[in-house]
Image: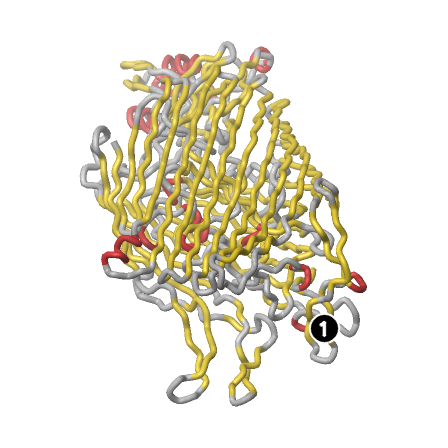
Amino acid sequence: MKHIISACFFLFSLCMSAQSVTITVDQNVTLKEFFKQIENQTDYKFAFTDQIDTGKKYFTQKNTFKQTTIEKLIAELNKTATLQFSIAGNNIFVKQKAQSPKTTTKKKSRLKGQILDDEKQPVIGANVYITELQTGTVTDVNGKYSIEVPNGTYTVSISYVGFQNKERQININDDTTLNFNIESDSQQLGEVIVMNNKAVDVKTTQMSVNRLSMQEIKKIPVAMGEPDPLKSILTLPGVTNAGEASSGFNVRGGAADQNLILLDGAPVYADSHMFGFFSIFNADIVNGLDLYKGGIPSKFGGRVSSVLDVTQQTGDFENYKVNGGIGIISSRLLVQGPIQKEKSSFILSGRASYAHLFMKLADNKNSAMFYDLNAKFNYRFNPNNTLSFSGYLGNDLFDINERFSSTYGSTMGILSWKHKFSDRLNSNLSGFYSDYKFNLGLSTENFEWDSSISSYGLKYAWNYQTSEKFKINYGIDGLYYNFNPGVVQPTSSDSQFNYKQLDKKYALETSAYIDFENQITEKLNFRYGLRYSSFYRLGGEDISTYENGQAVVFNPLYKIYEEGTPTGTISYKKGQAISTFNNFEPRAALSYSFNDESSVKASYNRMAQYIHILSNTQSPLPMSIWTPSGPFTKPQLLDQYAMGYFQNFKDGDYSFEGELFYKKVQNRIDYIDGADVLANNNIEQVILNGKARSYGLELLFRKNAGNFTGWVSYTLSRAEQKTVGRTPEEPGIANGDWYLSGYDKLHNLSVVGSYELNPKWSFNGNFTLQSGQPVTYANGYYEFGGINVPNYSLRNENRLPLFHHLDVAATYTPKPDKKKGWQSYWVFSLYNIYNRKNAASMSFTTNDDTGANETRRLSIFGIVPGISYNFKF
């Protein structure tokens, strides 16, 4: 019997092995497709472990097998494939090839290169994946990557959301450079498949950061119909502002002046045109933006809320290109191309509004306009040395009935030299200048007021990669400030104002930092660093002295704070230190990945801020004045803790981010009731030093692939301030208790969606819902001299009504298949489609007819249509 069974088994095996197949395999065939071809022609079944991904492409070269036996097919595949096949009965077992000792001792070489998009711009954060090694890296801010691999033949896959994936076979025997150009996938009819692209990088330690590409920014509908990088970040969790047509933005309950805004590495001190209707960032020239809300790396400093890092395009080194747009309010034009092909490039962009022209046609004497210019030049001396210059110039002009006029604007320039010492060490040396100027003229009062802030800076940064698992970033910064709070001068002989120059202020801020990125295990990553900052308030300046050293005094009779009386001054010579501050700013971040799709992260950072905006409004105004820390104004100090859970679903088609945060700020400026900060030469007489805190939950769910993409973000948070009395008799602000800051938004919901109907039509929508802004209402009134005088509640005890609006846009591309010559598309938009009258403010007054008290709501926008024609050639 035993012999009969053995014979049967032998005959069965012989029959199975005699089966022949006809099959073709190449680099585009997935393992699942290969299995299907075999199983359709034979009785064999495949067995494999969970480590084998059947959706991947394991074959490295093209082979065609005609009427080949299974045994011969398996033997041939084992020679070239990255998997090991073996036959047992009617099963074919599949497993990863074990590396032999000879393989593990292979010489290693460095694979490096640059990834550019179809506009020849660097792609930041693109995924570079080595299929056979199941490892990879991402591109840096210059679109460059570098990874060390054993010598051999590999499949290199490039992927990035919104772009077509690319693969290339390469044989590496020595250090190799491999560059890629990837094309936009926005016009594809079929589903966008993102292979090996993680919408959330679950393994990196970086958390509390949101990145938006220009493809995403241009899809978000905004008022006036023009894409706006700054407005786009308001759709992200933890980000709000004071309302419609308001400048600045608030991150995790912080004030607008607590945000560090960088344009190509240079600081920007004002972020908007036309009192907040437009941001200063021209969407045509912006390459992308990163918003750091927490876990901020050591290379950033000087603010305690967030860092908005905006980068401009580099300009095309090979071809001349022109693009622009014509809108209802403004138009824009961009020109780029090579100065010397493959050696140097330029890019120039400009915008201008023309609403004032329509006002003149309507016989309206008012005027409102803005313009800005952006420029960037690049020169490649050789592969290791690049010199670049970025510049910005923008101005606004308001003129109301020739009675009120205002001009304000910013100027920025930065010169950078990037040097590559080796594949492991590179540096970036940059010097910059940035200023903001404001002018106000009142013809009825016959005077003008000019103020400004200007700064000069130097940065030197190094990046050193000791291995794939350990990187060091370090550098030094220096920044010199010149603050001009204002000069008041009469414009006629009958003006009641005399010439007055408010005290100019000077300061020097220096810092040094070091950051370590350490991959401890395959699952555990740790980043830790330290920043040391110093701040010197410098003369020449006269500093007032006060009785008992108090610039603000408490009046116990009226129970109010009042301005202290100066007793004298101390004169400081030019360059002499008035005040000196030093702070250590440790940073740490940790990530633990459960698998390739999910992880938990935690971070801590301390930051110091030495300059402040003087404004007792929630939204910064153009006339808001920057001032340095000094004898009466201490630096703000932040401690922030955050932890979160991150997961990708379906190969990154969907992603989820959830974070908890807690932040506390020492020495937050607070204002006494009735504080007058405009043209105040002794600002210390109206401010107190308090503290602030905020905490909350942020959720972000994204759909990253398919005809329909978008995200839903929700934030539940609280932001509070507290200023206690300096003595038991003083009440402080709001009786010394925690009170809502002007930036508190308990609920903040944003829903952003984009649908590609076909190559010609796409549709976009954006819904925003926020809790009303904290305000102080009148809770009664008393009569004095026949006049009703309102009596107000404690600070920020009330709220404006709920804020919400829905915006929609449609994009029409007449000739989507046209890739050369004149290309164009139209954008039709409706802001606030259901005409919601959101309250910008509430005022309390008396009805002129009835004499009754009444509350009036001021709204900025109703429904706002927009249309723009956009082109390129």
> Residue 713, position in %: x, y?
46, 54
- Classify 767 as above or below 868: below
* Amino acid type indicated by mark 1: Pro
Q: Nearer the viewer, residue 30 or 628?
A: 628
Relative to 572, 481 lies left or right: left
Q: Is residue 708 visible?
A: yes
Q: Tell me residue 559's x, y (percent).
A: 70, 77
Q: How many marks?
A: 1
Q: Please name the residue that numbered disc 1 is placed on.
A: 731
Where is 559 relative to 606, above or below?
below
- Which residue does the image show at 73% across and 75% down from the upper left? 555
Based on the displayed image, in which of its 4 quarters is residue 406 positioned?
bottom left
> For the residue labelled by badge 1, is the local secondary structure a helix, a strand or a loop?
loop
At horizontal 48% and vertical 13% (from top left) the residue drawn is 172
Q: Residue at x 54, y 84 (%)?
A: 780
Label 1 neighbourhood size at 10 Å, few (<14), some (14-19), many (20+)?
some
Please tell me whether residue 60 is drawn above or below residue 573 in the rendered image: above
Give percent across and percent down for residue 152.
49, 13
- Tell me where residue 465 appears, x and y as whole percent: 61, 24
Residue projecting furthest to the right: 548
Q: Using residue 791 as the reference point, say whether residue 801 is left or right of it.
A: left
- Which sits in the foreground, 57 or 656? 656
> Where does the N terminus fall, quadrant-wise?
top left
Q: Residue furthest front?
A: 493
Colour pattern of the rendering = secondary structure
Residue 83 seen in render? no
The image quadrant where one finds the C terminus is top left
